[in-house]
Every structure is written in C-alpha cells, then in structure tokens.
Amino acid sequence: MKVSASQFSNFTDCRRKWWLSRVAKLPEVAKGYLTFGTVLHACLERWCSGDANGRVPSPAPEALAGQIPGEPVEVFPRGWEIVEEKGVKVSVTPNEAALIRKLVEQAIERGIVVRGDGRVLEREISLPLIEGVELIGFIDCFIPGEPPEIQDHKSFGESSTRFLKQSDPTSPNYLGKDQQLRTYAAAISQLEGWTGPVKVRHNQFPKFADPRGPRTAEAVLEPAVLAEHWAHIQDLARSMILTAGIKEWKDVPGPEDPNTCHKYGGCPFREICGRVVTLDGYRAKVEKQIEALATERPNVKLDPKPKKKSTMSGDVFARAKAKAQPAPAATATAPAPAAPQAATPTSINGGVPPPAQPVAAVENPPPWANPTCTSCKGTGFNSKGRPCPICDAFAKKLNKPTSGKFNVSGSLEEGFAATARPEFQAELGGLAWSSKGGTVEASAPVPAPATMTAPGPQGGTVSSVAVVMPVAAPVVAQAPDTAAVMAGTLATPAEIEPLPVEEKAGKGRPKLGITILVGCVQLKGPSRPTVLAQALLEQVGAELAKDMGASSYWELDTWKRRDRIRQRAGVIAEALGKTVLLVPGVRDPDVDSLVSALVMHADTVIEGVR
C-alpha cells in the first residue's frame, strides 16, 4: 500500500471517504478551484528552475521541457494557462491568468521565491513507513542545510483567509501543527539521517485582489515533535490496513464531524452515503463525465448548410451579415415590373431589405447617431441598413431620441429619411430628418412622394417611398433582435411595432436544435456530436477577433465582444444543429455569456442541481 500526506488528512477526516477513493478506487471529476493553484505552481517551478542568470540549464529540467538550454527561461510560454488534471485539460480564466502573472512578479520581487543555493524542486519522498506500507510524496521546494528547510506553495480564496496558517505558535492556525508539513519534515529527517530541527514554510498566494499580495508563514519543528508525528502516522498506516480489509462501504465508519461532508467544496461521495446512487451507478456517471470532458472538440462548422450554391466566406460573422439579407419573396400574382434605372427602395423598419452594401457616407447624421461610435463610424446606420443599435443604446442613456421613435425609410445607396412617429409627435415637436436635406420641421413643405412597388412578405406588393420622402407609404416595423434587447443595445419591444407572424411553408416535425447540459452529462439517449462550451468560445472568439480586426478575442472590449456574440447567437445555434453543448463546473464569465445567449435558441436545456 502506498500512502501520502494528503491521504492521512482524508483518513483522519473520514475513513469512508478514504475507503471509497483508495480501496474502491472510485473516479473523481477534477475540481475547478484547484486549477488556479496548479497553473500558479507550474509558473513558480519554471522560474525557480532557471540558473543564476535566469537561463535554461543544460540539460533542461522537466519543468522547462521544450525550452532551449542557454536561452532565457520562459515563465509564461505558449499555452501556460492550460494544465491537465485527472486526464482533462483545463484552463484558468483570463482574469485569473492576469492575477497569476502579478503574483509571480510580486513573489520574485519580495524574495519569496529565489533561484540557486542548492535547492531541490519537487523533491521526491519514497520510504517504508511500516511493513507493507510505503510513504510517497513530493516537496515543492527542499533546501538542504542546518536546519534543512521545506517550502510548500499554497493558494487560497477570499473565504479561506481566516484558515491561513500563521507563524504565531499561540494561534489555532499555527503552521507547526500542519499535518502535511510535519509528515514531510519527519520523512526528510528519516531520508537524510537528520536528528535536528527542520524549518517549514508556506508561500501563500491569494486568488483574489488582495492588497497584501503573496506572503509567507514559517515554523521550526523540533526533533521531539517529528519523532512523535512519525509514530502517529505509523499508527494511521496500521489503521488504514485494517480499514482496507473491510468489504462493504457501509461497514466503514463515516466522519465524526458532519461538517466534514461539506469541506473543500463538498465530498464527491455524498450521494453514495445518502443511498441516492450505488457504487456502480456513481462509477458509470462519473466516468461518463470524465470521458465527455476529455473528448477533443469535434470539427464543428458554424456555417449552416446553404440551400443553393453560395460564395459566402467561412467566417461565422460574415455569414451572419449575409444571412440577414434574404432574397425577395416571389409575388402571388405577376412579378413586379423591372426598374433598371432606380434601385428598389426599402423601409428600414420593414419591407424587403436591399443586398448587403457597405455603410454609406451620411452627410447629416440622424438624431440618434453617436459621432464617436466605432461600429457605424458615426453614421447612425449599420452595414445592414438598419439604425445602429450601439448608437441607440448611447442615445437612450443620454435621453436623446432613439431610432424607435421615428419612421425611417431609405437605403444605403440613396440615403435615409425619418419622421417622428405619431405617438412621439408631441415629444419630438414634429421633428423630421433627411440624410441629405438636414433636420426639418414636419410642417415644412414636402413634395409629393414618388412611390414604387416591391414584393411583399407574403406575396402581393407593398408600397415603399422614395429615399428622400419620409412620409406616405405604410411602414411595417421589424421585429427586435431579442438577444440585442437582452444586451440593452436595442430599443425595447414597446418602442417597435412587431412584424406580423408569417406562416412557415411545409409541415412535419420541427428541426432538432442544440441541447445544453450545464453541470451534468447524458447517460442514455441518442448519440450526438458533443462540444465543450470553452472550446466553442475559442472557435467563435477567433472568428469574432478576425471580424473586428483584433489579434485575439481577449484584446476586445469585454462588453463589446459579449454583445457581438449575443447578436450572433441564432446563427451559431443553427450551425451547431443537433450538437450537445457541455458546460462543466469550471465557469468563465465569457463562457456564461455565450451559453446564456444560446439558451433561448436551444431545443433542450438541462442543469444539474445539488
């Protein structure tokens, strides 16, 4: 039997938990809160592995595998934010990555971590404890000397600050009472033949914005304390052998303190003790979870299958723009007469959209336009010929008129015009606007509108006014982009007249959409392609960065990048089709934003609860 210092702690807390883990060998899903410490530890080890000049020694140690001897040590090489835990690759969030960089720099500046002086990183422990039991483990940093010193790196959350180990011997959290460090110190004394005291130290790193930053706690363990602890863990090893001989889990004693079940994020085996699942049921469920988390991302193409031969690019956001420009519907009677000498005008709030065009120059911006808007370049209209939602949101904050208070008509080719809607006439004083003619009062003389016909949304024809004529033909409002409304970038539904519901051609079963599993996995059911939410974000984020002219998704403004993804959620959901989207317990604000945007487009959403 091989035992470690952490096993002694688990065995002392709850023998049944130790039995289920070490004897029954039940699998466990890696806990997300451990990832921060694992990534931080790897960065500290890389820095400490360099020589006195900060270069990669020859031969390069395991911590610097892949780095060139003689070159400066890369503490943060490509992919440093990703680690493997229990066979699953996991990553810290961008905010955590920035904090880790800062903590490592502070630890170096304050001399908490240093290079050289004969120190041994990841010093291995392996020696017999009693007959049939071997003690194993790794010390983060061992410094030989008189006395020898043992250092252990520890990260802690804001809620754990009160449990931090202290250097004060009178404190209930005195470091000298730590079972893990006592075990390491006793083992080193045995291995080195040392009979004197051993110095121990915790290098403590906060996982939150703590103004104190990294710190240390130290203690000196006297030989008598080490000898007593060695005898203590020998007794524990004998008890472990007896406990390992028990055949049924229910015959193994549980914890004396019921609060133990909730320590460290909660015991993974609580459902077994509560007889909610059997050992076999638990094993099947967790193995399925681990397998799902470890599955490589499938080659999911985010573009929906074109019904006709298409020249659309592979960029999901370029496709979103193209998708927003549908071809005109066929008329119920005869086709509308061709008018080659003039482009078919359209209403921004309804009618038939024109082909995609670049944003035209607007000589006179509309009342809702924001001159500093980077999305529409201050024109007040986006590339689809619709009022810019970002300008609208800004105008709303400044109590300026939004586009929802106007009847807007025109096109990207010819220009736009707008008049105050009847319900806002009193508020706006009859305000009327033209992109070419400036802002005018509604009472100003206006020539008779020139009209022409265009195919209607359900056959027949509808009238549409010429570009500079803001009144006359009836205007059909466009249904709001629900995701944009949720993001606060569009006028509320109360400000926009809804589109009439159009009957869908054809009958039959509805098309299956995506399934979102939050904190759970599918144990039984139809086989479908699976993708991790984090992997999907990486793919969509790369395309978004390209679309917005950035080298990385994380360089974009936090709120802008999330809003853009929400606005494209429908296209992403349609492209995923029957894919199952897995959202594990390791959460990221950007992942949460993506998932929440996709929920409204999903066929099924299931969230695991405790």
Image: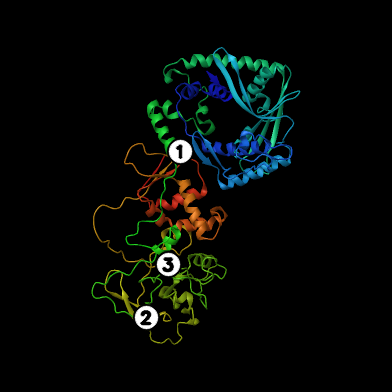
Circles 2 and 3: CB atoms closer than 8 Å: no
Label disc, if present, on residue 495 of the rendered structure = 3
Instruction: Left or right? Give the position of 179 relative to 296.
Output: right
Residue found at x 48% / y 40%: 585
- Give the quarter of the image for residue 114: top right
In this rendering, which labeled residue sits more in front, label 1 or label 2? 1
Q: Is residue 417 visible?
A: no
Q: CB under 8 Å between callouts 1 and 3?
A: no
- Identify the residue shown where x is 42% and y is 36%: 291
Residue 202 is situated, as x and y percent measured from the top left of the image, at: 67, 31
Determine the secondary structure under disc 1: helix
Structural crowding at the residue carrying mark 1, measured as other residues with C-alpha within 10 Å and reported as few (<14), some (14–19) or many (≥20): some
Say which label, 1 or 3, has the lower sequence index.
1
Task: Name above or below for residue 593 compared with residue 199.
Answer: below
- Between disc 2 and disc 3, the foreground one is 2
User: Mark 2: which amino acid?
Assistant: Ala
Position in image of residue 594 (x %, y %): 46, 51
Q: CA distance from mark 1 to mark 2?
A: 61 Å
Looking at the image, tell me whether mark 1 or mark 2 is earlier in sequence order: 1
Tag shown at residue 558:
none
Instruction: Find the residue positioned furthest to the top.
Output: 131
Q: Mark 2: few, some, or many residues within 10 Å (few <14, many ≥20)?
A: some
Task: Decide which of tag 2 and tag 3 comes sooner along the chain.
Answer: 2
Counting every numbered tag in the picture gives 3
Q: Which mark is residue 472?
A: 2
Q: 522 above or below 548?
A: above
Question: Which mark, residue 294?
Answer: 1
- Element at label 2: loop
Q: In which quadrant is the C terminus drawn?
A: top left
Q: Is residue 131 above or below residue 64?
A: above
